[in-house]
Amino acid sequence: MKITTNNFYLNNSMVISEKEIDAGATMFDNQWITNINVSTEIEVKKLNELSIYVPSTIDVDKINENLEETITSVKNKINEKAREYKTQGAWKAENGEIVFENICILTIIVNAENFENRLNDFIKLAHELKTELTQEGISIGINDGLMII
């Protein structure tokens, strides 16, 4: 099953070096991973991983002194049992500079029947975080793809 999105969505991930980071990348298992294809269709599987990327900053470079409270709040909104993965992300700011920061990725498993409703919950939450933390964008992981809100 596929659903169509109007949000900026990238699929097909690949490993890159730190020097190759352009639009954005995330560190997984000591490797930088980026998504390469812009798409309007999301492949929905029987079981799906939905993740929200919680940045450690407010604006571009101000440390969020209440990061653990922010993470707990997000977990409570999506699922208290969400898997938590702390890592580093990199992205290109509006000024063209590559910004590195610590992130916390919160992931839940969603079946195909609940996928679209849960995705909409994540999109709403990403908009809230974007405003609350004064971010240029908040990422949502969808299986091996990435949506940027």
Image (cartoon, grey):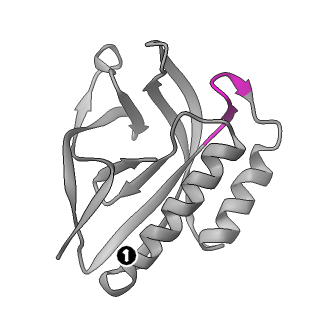
Q: How many marks?
A: 1
Residue 149 percent coordinates (x, y): 46, 47
Give the image quarter of residue 58.
top right
Residue 137 visible in the snapshot: yes
Question: What is the magenta range?
Answer: 55-62
Residue under the point 48% across and 21% down: 93
Give the image quarter of residue 18.
top left
| Vertical side of 102 occupied by 5: above or below | below
55 or 131, nearer to the observer: 131
| Vertical side of 1 occupied by 131: above or below | above
Residue 33 percent coordinates (x, y): 31, 36
Residue 25 percent coordinates (x, y): 37, 32
| Vertical side of 106 occupied by 148: above or below | above
31 with respect to 98 (left or right): left
Residue under the point 80% across and 53% down: 69
93 or 107, nearer to the observer: 93
Q: Residue furthest bottom?
A: 113
55 with respect to 64 (left or right): left
141 falls in the magenta region? no
Residue 23 percent coordinates (x, y): 35, 26
Looking at the rendered structure, the kind of residue marked 1 is Glu
59 with respect to 98 (left or right): right
Residue under the point 51% across and 55% down: 52
84 or 6, nearer to the observer: 6
102 or 97, nearer to the observer: 97
Badge 1 element:
helix
Residue 30 visible in the snapshot: no
Residue annotated with mark 1: 116
